[in-house]
Amino acid sequence: MNFKLIDIENWERKECFNHFMNIAKSTYSLTVNVDISKLLSLTKEKGYRFYPTFTWIVSRAINKHKEFKMGFDQNGNLGYFEEISPDYSVLNEKTKIMNSLCTSYNDNFKWFYEEMVSDMNNYKVRGILTEPQDNFFLISCLPWLSYTSFDVTNQSERQFLFPMVTWGKYFEHDGKVLMPLTLQVHHAVADGYHCSLFYSDVQQVLENPQNYIE
């Protein structure tokens, strides 16, 4: 876990960061319907579970941009992690209460997929939770609902800069299988431009999933 400090005084985003961090504190979310037709076919063909597969896709997109990996160290210094991992929600089938697991991210799809499936199975069968990490972003899934917008209000006193990614129930439209995908970010570190890069990176995999998922 390598954390790189940012020299705020000489940072090109200094004024923007201070404005949205201290004056007009702002987070915002964007929801886009993404075409998962090819990915869904591929996962069914290869027998892959959709949740860990799509988690890897969004984790790959998040890790391509430092704006989504910003945070503070234990001394309150601003910086960014070289790599962050998904902290994702899992449902307890008995209590219907959500818990969180965290699987270390890896560029290699097969490695990450097997690790996440193992973590999910260990929780389902034995109730084992994963070790918490400092370098993480949040993932949640609403497979019961297809929505047009989604927003989380974070009232924690902790300065939380990591993004939150959510997706909902997929649906058919004009011969395609679409799914709402939401990205919520802190405006102090990420603008709409950076969000567009995230969606572009996700779509790149969705258009040719066979090139990324073996």
Image (cartoon, helix red, strand yellow):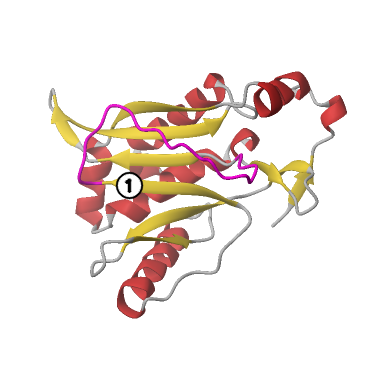
Q: Is residue 183 left or right of residue 94?
A: right
Instruction: Please state the horizontal and vertical placement of residue 42, each as a whole percent of the image.
Output: 25, 47
Q: Is residue 177 left or right of residue 138?
A: left
Secondary structure predominantly adopted by residues drawn in magenta? loop
Q: Residue furthest bottom?
A: 126
Camera-side residue: 101 or 20? 20
Image quarter of residue 91: bottom left
| Span highlighted in magenta in the image | 143-161
**Is disc 1 placed on a helix, strand or loop?**
strand
Q: Could you tell me which quadrant the N terminus lies in?
A: bottom right
Q: Is residue 214 something one can see in this rendering? A: no
Image quarter of residue 173: top left
Does 39 lie within the magenta span?
Answer: no
Give the tally of numbered discs: 1
Image quarter of residue 146: top left
Residue displayed at 47% across by 33% down = 184
187 vs 43: above or below: above
Camera-side residue: 184 or 122? 184
Residue displayed at 59% across by 26% down = 187
Does 147 lie within the magenta span?
Answer: yes
165 vs 193: above or below: below
Instruction: Please state the horizontal and vertical placement of residue 121, each as a whole percent of the image.
Output: 34, 72
Q: Is residue 169 something one can see in this rendering? A: yes
Instruction: Please state the horizontal and vertical placement of residue 97, each as a whole percent of the image.
Output: 31, 61
Instruction: Please state the horizontal and vertical placement of residue 59, each as a whole percent of the image.
Output: 48, 46
Residue displayed at 38% across by 31% down = 203
Residue type beneath disc 1: Cys
For disc 1, the neighbor class at 10 Å (few under 14, some 14 to 19, many from 20) is some
Residue displayed at 55% across by 20% down = 193
34 vs 90: above or below: above
Residue identifier under label 1: 141
